[in-house]
Image (spheres, rainbow, N blue to C red):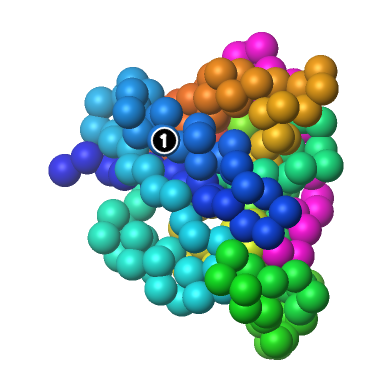
């Protein structure tokens, strides 16, 4: 049975009417990357809601039993792709989600650590994206919204996981949707090739 790499993006939310990660995921789903033998990809667009963490994401993980999870989202104020090296134990109580709901607790886990490191190699992902011709850098701050929380939830579930923030596709001087898709394909391929690698290239 093929091992699955689960790849997700996000839909729209207050302040972002067109999420580039959704556009990228839909393009990838139409023409999936060619992965090594024994590997397959599964794609999903997640709703930007706090209930997604308890409903949609666990259901996807149960259905696919992924060997690794790679999340994509948008960081509108950033000008290049950012590979998140950690998820922080914090959550915004001020920003409504796509359903208009607010989170009540400013921490994701009252008994958890201050942060959890991503378990897919940030250096490997950055190198792959740069090799595709798109600028990328490491980030140690995934924010305090659903992007950060989604990475946190995947990490505590025990999956090798990382989160990649995309800039808006219309950022002046930045990558367009085709560039973002190319970068995402490179990142996906790098993760797939790293799974099961004897040198442990998949993880940090």
Residue furthest left as drawn: 1
Name the residue located 69 percent from the left edge and 71 percent from the top edge: 96
Residue 81, visible in the rendered structure: no
Give the residue drawn at x 36%, y 61%: 61
Where's residue 159, x and y in %? 47, 58
Answer with the quarter of the image where residue 30 lies: top left
Identify the image quadrant of the C terminus. top right
Residue 49 position (above or below residue 30): below
- x and y, in percent, of residue 125 in the image: 62, 32
Residue at the image point whose x is 56% and y is 40% from the top: 21
Residues drawn in magenta: 127-145
Can the viewer see residue 184? Answer: yes
* SS state under label 1: helix
Name the one closer to the observer, 82 or 146: 146
144 in magenta: yes
Left or right? Give the position of 4 relative to 170.
left
**Which residue is labeled 1 in the image?**
26
Q: Position of residue 158 (x, y in %)?
A: 48, 64
Q: Please determine whether, in this image, residue 199 is positioned above or below residue 85.
A: above
Identify which residue, 179 or 154, lies in the foreground. Answer: 179
| Camera-nearest residue between 20 and 90 | 20
In the image: residue 4, left or right of residue 27: left
Q: Quadrant of residue 2?
A: top left
Mark 1 Cα within 10 Å, few/some/many (few <14, many 20+)?
Answer: some
Residue 19's spot in the image, x, y percent?
A: 60, 43
**Count of number-bearing discs:** 1
Give left or right: position of 46 versus 203: left
Q: In this view, does 43 lie to the left or right of 16?
A: left
Q: Residue at x 77, y 28 (%)?
A: 171
Vertical comparison of 138 with 68: above or below: above
């Amino acid at each position: 049975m093929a091992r699955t790499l689960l790849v997700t993006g996000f839909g729209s939310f207050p302040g972002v009417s067109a999420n580039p990660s959704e556009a990228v995921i839909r393009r990838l789903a139409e023409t999936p990357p060619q992965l090594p033998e024994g590997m397959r990809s599964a794609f999903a667009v997640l709703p930007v809601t706090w209930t997604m963490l308890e409903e949609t994401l666990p259901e996807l993980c149960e259905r696919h039993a992924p060997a690794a999870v790679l999340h994509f989202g948008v960081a509108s104020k950033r000008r290049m792709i950012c590979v998140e090296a950690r998820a922080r134990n914090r959550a915004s109580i001020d920003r409504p989600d796509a359903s208009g709901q607010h989170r009540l607790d400013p921490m994701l886990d009252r008994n958890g650590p201050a942060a959890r490191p991503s378990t897919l190699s940030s250096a490997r992902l950055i190198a792959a994206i740069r090799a595709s011709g798109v600028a990328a850098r490491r980030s140690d701050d995934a924010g305090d919204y659903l992007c950060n929380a989604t990475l946190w939830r995947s990490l505590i579930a025990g999956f090798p996981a990382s989160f990649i923030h995309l800039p808006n596709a219309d950022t002046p001087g930045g990558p367009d949707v085709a560039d973002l898709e190319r970068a995402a394909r490179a990142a996906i391929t790098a993760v797939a090739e790293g799974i099961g690698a004897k040198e442990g290239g998949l993880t940090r």
